[in-house]
Image (cartoon, grey):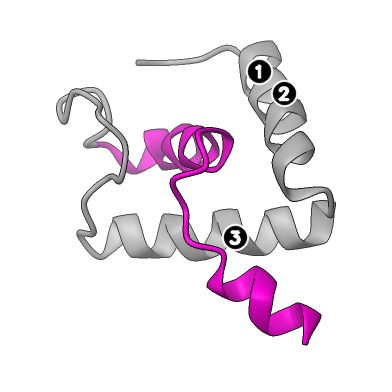
Amino acid sequence: MTLQIQDTLELVRQAMKVVKSRYLLCILISQRIHQLEKGAPPVIDVNPDDYSSPKTFLTLSLLEIIQGNMENETTESTSA
């Protein structure tokens, strides 16, 4: 599943509504991509064949954030 740049930017806009801070969003995405690279399973229902390539991990991470399926441990620890 390859998204155009405009589609990816729309996902970023939607994720910004959930996270609010672009810096925290960047950190969450980066951490999640590293987890996926190490073999962590997706936390949303997706076709594994569509998201098996590292090129799709950004999209998968954004979708997880938008759907609210990522834990907010990082958010809670940085706000304390």
Q: What numbered label is drawn on residue 38? A: none
- Residue name at image x 66 percent, y 83 percent: 77
Q: In the image, is residue 11 above or below residue 61?
A: above
The residue carrying mark 3 is 28
In terms of depth relative to the viewer, which is nearer, 51 or 74? 74
- Residue name at image x 67 percent, y 69 percent: 75
Check disc 1 and give the amino acid type.
Answer: Ile
Residue 33 coordinates in the image, percent (x, y): 44, 55
Distance Cα–Cα, label 1 vs label 3: 20 Å
- Residue name at image x 60 percent, y 60 percent: 28
Distance Cα–Cα, label 1 vs label 2: 6 Å
- Judged from the image, the secondary structure of the residue bearing numbered disc 2 is helix
Q: Which residues are magenta?
A: 53-80
Residue 27 coordinates in the image, percent (x, y): 65, 64
* Tally of marks: 3
Name the N-terminal-most of marks 1 and 3. Answer: 1
Circle 1/circle 3 CB separation < 8 Å: no
The residue carrying mark 2 is 9
In terms of depth relative to the viewer, which is nearer, 60 or 79? 79
- Judged from the image, the secondary structure of the residue bearing numbered disc 1 is helix
Circle 1/circle 2 CB separation < 8 Å: yes
Q: In the image, is residue 80 above or below residue 6?
A: below
- Judged from the image, the secondary structure of the residue bearing numbered disc 3 is helix
Distance Cα–Cα, label 3 vs label 2: 16 Å
